[in-house]
Image (cartoon, rainbow, N blue to C red):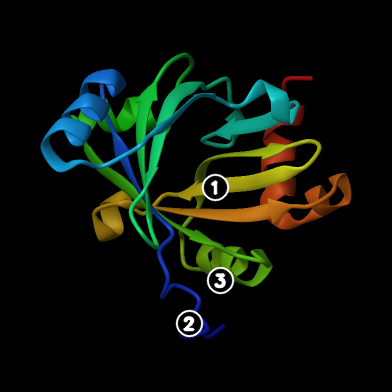
Amino acid sequence: MDIPGNLFKQCVQVGVVVRDLDAKVAALMRLFGIGPFHIIDYPAVERGPMLKQYHGQPGQFTARIASANLGTVDLELIEPAQGPSIWHDFLAQHGEGIHHIKFTLSDDVPILEHLAQNGVQVEMGGVYTQTGNSFCYLDTQDTIGFCIELMRVVASPEDNSKPMSSTIQAAASRSI
């Protein structure tokens, strides 16, 4: 499969893993005037249940997340909370720093199939069982030096039958 030339041309987010979210938000606002930040506990309870997977197994991860708009790109700060996650893994292996860049896709089928054929697997992901989005982090840290996150909008529960969601649901169902 040839990757469409424009598929990975517009990054929508840079994600940074941190140990102390409040301290980093305060420093960014004080030193650089970056903000305001929107801070949430993730996953957002008001969006309904989320099926999560971590390395192909059911996931139980949570985090505190702060996001700020930087023009065409959002800055996301992630403070891992409970459960094993690639965020905890990143802190243990690298310390704080830039973890991922994110792209939004309307159809993740071709790219996930292409990447799987080339040895790139989903290492963590989630999908809301109602509406919202599905996301996955690709295991690209060793290959390119950072992680790629893909996100697809889930407009209805029927959208959860697509491959990104199916992969996550399959892992999550092992715990049921």
Residue 102 location, x and y as percent?
44, 55
Closer to the camera: disc 1 or disc 3? 1
Kindly give the residue lying farthest to the left in the view shown: 31
**Residue 6, numbered circle:** 2
Q: Please, what is the three-letter code of the amino acid marked with disc 1?
A: Cys
Q: Earlier in the sequence, mark 1 or mark 3?
A: 3
Label 2, label 3: how many angstroms apart (C-alpha)? Answer: 16 Å
Residue shown at the point (79%, 35%) measured from the top left: 129
Residue shown at the point (66%, 46%) measured from the top left: 133
Label 2, label 1: how many angstroms apart (C-alpha)? Answer: 20 Å
Label 1, label 3: how many angstroms apart (C-alpha)? Answer: 15 Å
Examine the image and state in which quarter residue 148 appears: bottom left
**In the picture shown, does residue 49 fall above or below 4?**
above
Closer to the camera: disc 2 or disc 1? 2
**Left or right for 60, reference 89:** right
**In the picture shown, does residue 156 fall above or below 63?**
below
Examine the image and state in which quarter residue 72 appears: bottom left
The quadrant in which the N terminus is found is bottom right
Residue 80 location, x and y as percent?
39, 22
**In the picture shown, does residue 136 fall above or below 27?**
below
Inspect this view and state whether residue 50 appears.
yes
**Left or right for 13, reference 30:** right
Dot 2 falls on a residue whose secondary structure is loop
Q: Are marks 1 and 3 in contact (CB under 8 Å)?
A: no
Examine the image and state in which quarter residue 60 appears: top right
Dot 3 falls on a residue whose secondary structure is helix
Camera-nearest residue between 68 and 95: 68
Q: Earlier in the sequence, mark 2 or mark 1?
A: 2
**Left or right for 35, reference 131:** left
Dot 1 falls on a residue whose secondary structure is strand
Q: Identify residue for label 3.
A: 114
